Image (tube, rainbow, N blue to C red):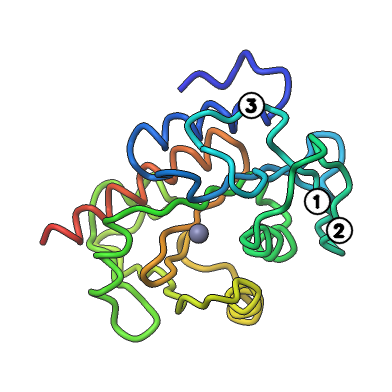
Amino acid sequence: MNLRDISHPREGLVRIAAEFYRRGWMAGTAGNLSCRDPGDASSFWVTASGKAKGALTPEHFLLIDVAGGQVLEQGAPQNRPSAETAIHRALYRLFPDARACMHVHTVDACLAADRAQGDLLPLPPLEMLKGLGIWTEKPAVALPLFENHLDIGRIAEDIQQRFVHLPQVPAFLIRDHGITVWGESLEQAFHRTEIMEYILSYIARR
Ligand SMILES: [Zn+2]
């Protein structure tokens, strides 16, 4: 994935969405991607509601205020914020270092969540964990799991309440729904999403 020759991170998100769509991780209009505004970290760009993720353009994004949640720029007049914008906003409020966030609906994420113990999914000690910043011998790492709610605002509130401290890995699961992964750059968030999905696929096949 070449993200070096882009003039704005929205172009990078368009490429990433097309790739995730190709892999079946953003089927139809599912999922959403975001990044902080490069000139103002107090706001972030997020995909507009109901757009086909395999055919996005840089106009299909809204600029959202992190603190208040209001729309600062609409991208195009018909753009509406997705309810899932609340999940992205919660992460940017919690973690100042997060600059990009990927929320995708994958089959293996839903299957793997069924192996959770309570609200944590233990992760196998795979080599791939290094890509998520885990460098210990035989690591004991668990992925936070949240219950799914029709009211997405309720999921965002649960995230806000639970993540008083940084989780072990920069990701979480929502049961019967999908994964959310963040990073300090577009590239890092993209790679971490690939790694997380690899680990969840492994769990789902065991
Ligand atoms: Zn979702």
Which quadrant would the C terminus be assigned to in this image? bottom left
Task: Look at label 2 and name its amino acid.
Answer: Gln
Badge 3, how many Cα within 10 Å: few under 14, some, many 20+?
some
Q: Name the residue: 79% across, 35% down.
A: 76
Numbered mark located on residue 148 in the image: none
Image depth: mark 3 or mark 1 in front? 3
Q: Position of residue 135 (x, y in %)?
A: 37, 53
Residue where numbered disc 1 is placed: 64
Nearer to the camera, 79 or 162: 79
- Residue carrying label 3: 57
**In this orientation, does residue 170 appear?**
no
Compared with 44, 82 (above or below) is below
**Image quarter for residue 194?**
top left
Q: Nearer the viewer, residue 89 or 55?
A: 55
Secondary structure of the residue carrying numbered label 2? loop
Residue named by callout 2: 70
* Mark 1 in CB contact with mark 2 (< 8 angstroms): yes
Q: Is residue 141 above or below residue 136?
A: below
Residue 191 to residue 159: above or below: above
